[in-house]
Image: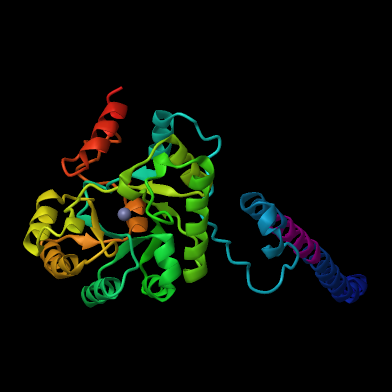
Amino acid sequence: MGTEGIEDVMFPLRKRMPLDRRTILVGSLIIALIFSSFTLGLAILLSKSAHGNRSTANLARSGPTHEPKISVGPTTGPPTPPIVLPQSPLTPFPSLLPDQLALLQAKDRFFYHGNTGLPEIALTFDDGPNPPYTAQILAILERYHVKATFFCVGKQVQAYPGLVKQEYDSGYLVENHSWSHANLPFLSDASLLWQFSTTQNIIEHATGARPTYFRPPYGAFNAAVLTNANRFGLSTVLWNVDPRDWSRPGVNTIVARIIAQTVNGSIILMHDGGGDRSQTVAALPIVITWFLRHGYRFVTLEQLVADYHLDNNLQPSRKPHIPPGLQAWWRRKLQMIYNR
Ligand code: ZN
């Protein structure tokens, strides 16, 4: 009886227990559903707002002229690839040459050598394209798998766009060396602007890419030249190895001068344009073989700049020494600027 009574008393409890469990189960499921849908909603909201911020940032970087290319809306589908733009001008840009050089060098936008602690060399060929020498140089570079940069003259690009396309498609840089190889500091502002813009446009027309580097003909520059280079977002690149191959001193002399002047991070000036360059073509395989055998690697200017601040045992000074191979008149100019 006692136990029955107890069972009677417990029975209704036993009957209620399964109901309570079910209620608790269903209830917790509902709560879980509500909570998860809330979390999902919050996540979608957050991701939308993050996407919106990124789009705004892209818009701010690219400026209003690129607005139509930017997808702002959809959150589905593949992500929008980043827009690769040519270098933008530095603003504000100073008007005095020493201030310009200080700013440009601080931003790696004016240089004539790379990292002096790395066995990297940049081969640069000026004044082309120029048949048959440009194609011969390209064949040699490809045979040795060596990178190089071509500073092209605009009117030559107009005459031989196929050669420039071949340079670009083979992975070499095609850059601005003015339209007519003019001595730029002697030009009016309007002519200077024209030299820059027409060359930028003709190279872009030939290759599909706008140059980001500029080399003034004869290495001649002043404040107006650098102002215009900056206007087009161009970095100014000189050199610290000059074999004077354009004067056709003989193949052996070209090779000897290059080997004597080249150090880590050197930028070598040679010419595929401006006349008979058969000596340059003949010297090139000898030069390439010599440096490859001595552990150097050949890079484009882009790579040279990218590696400029890499750690090495011989940290280069931000105020580089004036190498002996430079043309005397702008060596003096740089010395004046550095020593002021
Ligand atoms: Zn030149």
Residue in the picture at 44% in, 41% down: 225
Residue in the picture at 85% in, 76% down: 18
Quarter of the view holding residue 222: top left
Residue 167: percent from left, percent from top? 36, 71
Quarter of the view holding residue 330: top left
Question: Quadrant for ligand 1?
Answer: bottom left
Quick check: is 41 in the magenta stretch?
A: yes
Assign the C terminus to one quadrant of the image.
Answer: top left
For this view, does 18 lie left or right of residue 330? right
- Magenta stretch secondary structure, dominant: helix
Assign the N terminus to one quadrant of the image.
Answer: bottom right
Residue in the picture at 17% in, 60% down: 296
Q: Examine the rendering and report whether any part of residue 144 can be seen.
A: yes
Tell me which segment is drawn in magenta. Answer: 37-51
Total marks shown come to 0
Quick check: is 226 in the magenta stretch?
A: no
192 vs 115, nearest the viewer: 192
Residue 283: percent from left, percent from top? 14, 66
For this view, does 108 lie left or right of residue 230? left
Where 4 falls versus 225 (above or below)?
A: below
Residue 329: percent from left, percent from top? 24, 36
Q: Examine the rendering and report whether any part of residue 320 can be seen.
A: no
Residue in the picture at 89% in, 70% down: 13
For this view, does 321 lie left or right of residue 22? left
Residue 271: percent from left, percent from top? 25, 61
216 vs 304, nearest the viewer: 216
